[in-house]
Image (cartoon, rainbow, N blue to C red):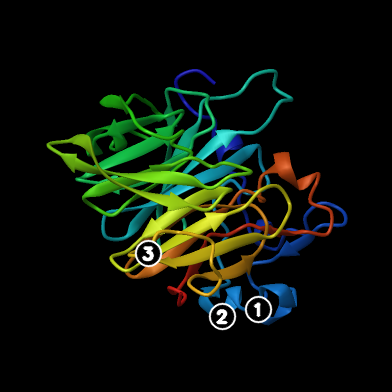
Amino acid sequence: MNDRVSRRDLVRLGAGAALAAGTAGTLTLTNLAPASAHPAVYNEYYKYFSVRSHTMPRHDTRWVPQGITWWGADKMIISYYDGSHEYGHRANSIISLMTRSSTHEIKALKLNTQRHLGGLATAAGYLWVAMDGRLLRYSPSKLAAGHGSLIHADKEWSVRSAASYAYGDGTSVWVGTCDENHRSTMYRYEIVKGEPRLRDSLPTPSKVQGVAVTAGKIVWSKSWGWANSSLIVWPRHIAYNGSTAIGNGITAPPRSEGITIANNRLQLVYESSADAYQAGAGNHPVVRSVHFGSMPPT
């Protein structure tokens, strides 16, 4: 790809895709199946999260979904990196702007990087991309570019943590490190005159792939490999210490990634829909849609 992203590579949707059977031996969480049709280990998860009738763009392709954020009153954005090695090199990472209600893609934009994106956040009217210990800022005018356009960040800043994931609450951006074996720390950067200013930090569990933060609660999306994921719901005013008497750990399908909140609803994305991971799925479930849910109790 040069200046524009190929439609063939970016979008492989269709009537049959929503009911794709997946690779041999793979349990596919088809989007039209009721929650009761899924393994009992996920019963609590599906008390809060609904099974959508719409698949997300680019499932069953080389593109690996990572971050998710709300955008405006009725849209959201998902970031993808190229998980394919058969082409000899990675294509540039992309962001997909879509309608929130239907996850219908409006357009995809190519970023000036081939890196594994860490997360997305919306704050102070900007889109923020987290990766490699940095926060990159994109103004709305950059996102106004046409489908397939290459866009560049307005500016970038080094931040504490690896910036493995991000969450934006409108005025601040949270970033943190996904540590496979150890608890870590996430940091809140208030956006002041378009620039991030460090204001706060909180301890986190290990293996955090995404986070959503409200005035009273924190929800961590925690996963690693094909083991079941978990959502850790924790009171914000108490420092995380792993106590099951304080927080609520909810078993979720494997490979959960970014999470966000819009209109008081959680939206959670999974990377298991990408070709790069399905070969090793075995009997593990594959999720091909954005999961929407209510806030679980702590």
Q: Position of residue 88 (x, y in %)?
A: 70, 18
Question: Which residue, given by chain and number where applicable, does mark 2 sit on?
Answer: 47
Residue 280 at x, y = what percent? Answer: 80, 46
Residue 118, position as x, y percentages in the image: 48, 38
In the rendered structure, are the residues bearing label 1 and label 2 in contact, judged by CB atoms less than 8 Å apart?
yes
Give the quarter of the image for residue 86.
top right
- Circle 1 — which element? loop
User: Which image quadrant: the N terminus?
Assistant: top right
**Would residue 278 be seen by someone viewing this image from the given angle?**
yes
* Placement of 123 over or under 51, stated as above or below: above
Q: In this rendering, would 150 be left or right of 254?
A: left
> Helix, strand, or loop for circle 2?
helix
Circles 2, 3 touching at the beta carbon (< 8 Å): no
Residue lying farthest to the left in this orientation: 193
Task: Name the quadrant containing residue 234.
Answer: bottom left
In the image shown, does 26 or 55 lie closer to the viewer?
26
Q: Secondary structure at mark 3?
A: loop
Q: Which residue is mark 3?
A: 238
Question: How many residues crowd around disc 2 within 10 Å: few (fewer than 14), some, or many (20 or more)?
Answer: few
Counting residues from the start of the chain, the first of labels 3 and 1 encountered is 1
Residue 43 tag number = 1
- Check the image and report above or below for 54 versus 9: below
Determine the CA span between mark 2 and mark 3.
25 Å
Q: Amino acid at mark 3?
A: Ile
Name the side, left or right, on which 135 lies relative to 104.
Answer: left
Q: Amino acid at mark 2?
A: Lys
Mark toward the viewer: 2 or 3: 3
Which class describes the residues within 10 Å of circle 3: few (<14), some (14-19), or many (20+)? few
